[in-house]
Amino acid sequence: MRRLRWFALAGLLTLALLLTGSALGDRAPNPIEIIPEEAIPPVMEGQHHYLLLCTDVWHGNPGNLGNTDGIVLVTLDTRAHRVMLTSIIRDALVWRPMEENPEEYGFGRINYIAKRLGPEALCKVISQHINVRVEDYLLFDFTQIANIVDFLGGVDIELNASEISYLQRYAVPDGSVRSVKTGVDLRSGGTHRPGLYHFSGHSAVIYMRIRKAGGGGDFMRTQRARTVMSTLADKCREITWEEAEALVNNVMDNNTMTNVNLEGMLDAARYAYSLRDCTIEELRLPPDGAVTPITFASMAVQEIDWERCREAMADYLKNSFLVVEDED
């Protein structure tokens, strides 16, 4: 009888916590100051920003976007001759429009915005947090990313021991990850040494989503996404313009939503083609020292110093070269 009473009491306590939103460990986030939309400066001359988004579903559609777990801003600078990749962690806490009334704002995770309010709203939120005007976006699901990677012939990635162990446990498809040196399939059993491995598109997506291998969590997940993108960019250095046009058509066929039309995509391809000999520069937002993990509304989130992020972004876009690496 006492045990039943204890379970009943525990159940009532749990229900009370859920109803009040006061789960243990929650705290009110610090205020977030955003830049008014009209105060965001014009895009620097020669710079072109494209927000690449990936939802956490294999088969998405405009009515089923899923959460936006991949957020990478690609900047092509034809004036300074630079290519820049800026990744934003998926559980960053932002000040965003409310679903019930977009004129009102409140705290929320960045990866929920596109699903609930659309990609345009996410562009606006990102613009107001990093003080960079972001308008063009392409949104993909996992299958579309895999198709684009396969169109480019797959990707070669350096794997460490923990990543190899994770991929073997995840059971990637047979033949989809092979040692570049030996040609041996990762699924063949036995011990596989760290080194360069060739990935098909499907397994490249799985690699980009690794979060629980080798430490680093979502910070290393964003690093892996940038690694795949920069490696694919390296593969495109030797392509012809005709092959670049074919890639544009493939991207146009393999996206869930975009506000970039074919003419705009061809313009982007021309910018990228003129910059194909550039070293790929990378930045992660938030930078080291500008983030605090907290629990808010029963969610694990990252509280960000957005002023530090804006400073890092401004330096990054103005300086001739900068790479900010993740911690291992």
Image (cartoon, helix red, strand yellow):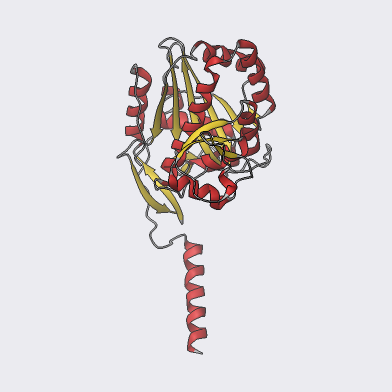
Q: Position of residue 8 (x, y in %)?
A: 52, 79
Q: Position of residue 39 (x, y in %)?
A: 41, 23
* Residue at x-position 36% and y-position 23%: 316
Vertical arrangement, residue 209 with respect to residue 18, above or below: above
Quadrant of the rendering where the C terminus is positioned: top left
**Residue at the bottom extreme?**
1
**Residue at the front extreme?**
182
**Is there any visible trace of residue 36 in the rendered image?**
yes
Viewer-proximal residue among 262 and 159: 159
Does residue 154 appear left or right of residue 288 in this picture?
Answer: right
Q: Using the rendered view, name the quadrant where residue 63 is placed.
A: top right
* Residue at x-position 47% and y-position 21%: 75
Vertical arrangement, residue 30 with respect to residue 126, above or below: below
**Is there any visible trace of residue 98 in the rendered image?**
no
Q: Position of residue 38 (x, y in %)?
A: 45, 23
Vertical arrangement, residue 80 with respect to residue 291, above or below: above
Counting labels gives 0
Viewer-proximal residue among 287 and 232: 232
Does residue 310 appear left or right of residue 60 in this picture?
Answer: left
* Residue at x-position 51% and y-position 74%: 11
Viewer-proximal residue among 229 and 26: 229
Q: Position of residue 234 (x, y in %)?
A: 50, 22
